[in-house]
Image (tube, helix red, strand yellow):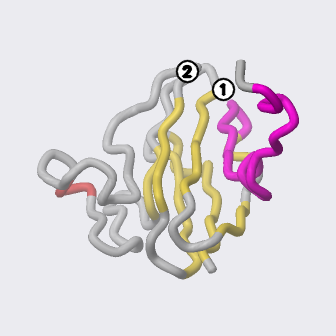
Amino acid sequence: SLEGEENMMPPMGESSLMVMYSDEGYSPKELTIQKGETVTFTNASSQPMWTASAIHPTHEVYPKTSIVKCSSAPAGEMFDSCVGTPTGSSWTFQFNEAGSWGYHNHLRPNHWGKVIVE
């Protein structure tokens, strides 16, 4: 290992850019980040998790996002995982648009959250 590596601290806030998904839903329900930061959505539930922009079922609130574009849009462009993320896996998204972005689990739409991008 590199000398002094163990003393390096991660950048401030980096560890908080994670949302856990359980059988009870997303946690935290609301997360505030800076424009350009990436959030990791980790599935710790017993079922697949399909994280997507509001509004169910079209997913069109976040710019350039729509469920109908899932098969054609470049990866990472849409705030929509477009598939179920298996238990124990995660999906990440970089937020490049400022605003308040609601999202939900397309497979269990009563589970929702919000990412506020400043």
Q: Position of residue 58 (x, y in %)?
A: 31, 62
Q: Nearer the viewer, residue 75 or 88?
A: 75
> Quarter-wise, where is residue 22 in the image?
top right
Q: CA distance from mark 1 to mark 2?
A: 6 Å
Write down the quadrant of residue 9 in the picture.
top right
Q: Residues within 10 Å of mark 2 (few under 14, many from 20)?
A: some
Residue bearing mark 1: 44
Q: Judging from the image, what secondary structure is the residue with disc 2 in?
A: loop
Residue sitting at x 47%, y 58%: 94
Q: Is residue 73 left or right of residue 85?
A: left
Residue 33 vertical position relative to residue 67 in the rendered view, above or below = below
Say above or below: 38 vs 22: below
Residue 75: where, in percent of width, then height? 26, 48
Looking at the rendered structure, the kind of residue marked 1 is Ala
Q: Position of residue 34 (x, y in %)?
A: 63, 71
Please give left or right for residue 55 compared with residue 112 in the image.
left
Which amino acid does the dot numbered 2 rest on?
Thr
Q: Which residue is mark 2?
A: 87
Give the farthest residue toward the left. 72
Is label 1 in a helix, a strand or a loop? Answer: loop
What residue is drawn where x is 32% and y is 44%?
82
| Image quarter of the N terminus | top right
Pick the residue in front: 16 or 72: 16
Residue 16 colored magenta? yes
In the picture, residue 65 is in which quadrant?
bottom left
Q: Are marks 1 and 2 in contact (CB under 8 Å)?
A: yes
For the magenta stretch, what is the residue range? Answer: 3-24
Give coordinates of residue 103: x percent, y percent.
53, 60
